Image: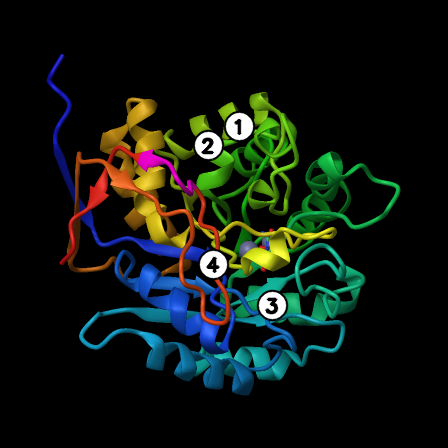
Amino acid sequence: MAPAPDTLTIRRPDDLHLHFRDGATMRAVVPWTARQFARAIVMPNLSPPVTTSAIAAGYRERIGAAVPEGVPFEPLMTAYLTDDTDPDDIAAGFAGGVLTAAKLYPAGATTNSASGVTDIARIMPVLERMAAIGMPLCVHGEVTGAEVDIFDREAVFIDRELAPLVARLPVLKVIFEHVTTAEAVQFVQGAGTNVAATITPQHLHINRNAMLAGGIRPHMYCLPVAKRETHRLALRAAATSGSPKFFLGTDSAPHHRHAKEAACGCAGIFNAPFALESYLQVFEEEGALDRFEGFASEHGARFYGLPLNEGVVTLERLPAAVPAEIEGGEASIVPFHAGDTLNWRLVSA
Ligand code: NCD
Ligand code: ZN
Ligand code: ZN
């Protein structure tokens, strides 16, 4: 067997799902992403949410102003769908290059989703229009009913909502975001080429024990919540399979330490600072270093119909110590892998 390489150079990657927030927090977190990724699909769940093309254009400008001088980084914007979304506005935003996709949050499913969609039937005109113009739909795939166990909400969403939607609009490009279950992997694999999924680093690294065994660990809590080990293994197999249907989307979701370490802690894991290092460790453990570039830099861009990035990034096999906390604007944020040492380190440009 050839010895494992000590450096890995890949085409500059994209993060196809993350949260930047706004204001001081955004200014603190954007540089972490910009140092690794050429582009990122920016989620619109601000408070109030980014519901129109005009709001997205303003948000894009604020993000651009937070990118460090000389760093080539392009935020790709999404619109937050509500029961009242105007199809003309969404289509104009897409045609004008302001919007790259629109996001479906079932109302109440996750952080800042209260204004989300109460019934997919209500936004059918928007979705039909998106299908007609080739505009991708990003989906937070969980049902919200209190009668459904939180660990089952993704699998139930597939049967109740996603499968019927995909059957009804067979050309709509759908990204099943942050998949966490073997059922989701199977659904995506079995669907047409218009259906793909993002996978986060945390769902490749941890199962639900990390959150609940030996004490409750709020920094391991995100939505969809981490599942059993069998699901983690299915996600690792999918991510490293080489299938163009699975690609990198960190779901980096910064919440300040005090908002996580609370009686009712927020959902979301801030993984942006060491995202590439975190994913790469998984690919190495799975003996799939040769498939990392596809997952990180090619599959997502191709699915979205974006040009592949020009430059490269290099990672070297050197210990990367993840700090216990990171400056997060108004307060500090505890990153994923806080206090741990990862095996790879990004070489700064
Ligand atoms: C995200 C957030 O904090 O905005 N939280 C999370 O747990 N993933 C929202 C989301 O992506 O569902
Ligand atoms: Zn989500
Ligand atoms: Zn997210």
| Residue 214 visible in the shown view | yes
Which residue type carries mark 4?
A: Leu
Query: Which mark is in front, 3 or 2?
Result: 2
The tag on residue 205 is: 2
Q: Secondary structure at mark 3?
A: loop
The reply to whether dot 1 and dot 2 touch (C-beta < 8 Å) is yes
Q: Residue beneath label 1, please?
A: 232
First in sequence, mark 2 or 4: give its number.
4
* Secondary structure at numbered mark 4: strand
Task: Indicate the quadrant of ligand 2 in the picture.
Answer: bottom right
Looking at the rendered structure, the kind of residue marked 3 is Asn
Determine crowd level at label 3: few under 14, some 14-19, many 20+ residues with C-alpha closer than 10 A: many
Which residue is denoted by mark 4 in the rendering? 18
Q: Considering the numbered disc 1 on the image, is that residue within a helix, a strand or a loop? A: helix
**Residue 216 on image: x %, y %:** 65, 36
* Residue 339 position in % (x across, y down): 39, 40
How far across and down, in percent of the image, does residue 87 sit?
64, 78
Query: Dot 3 corresponds to which residue?
Result: 45
What type of secondary structure mainly makes up the magenta span? loop
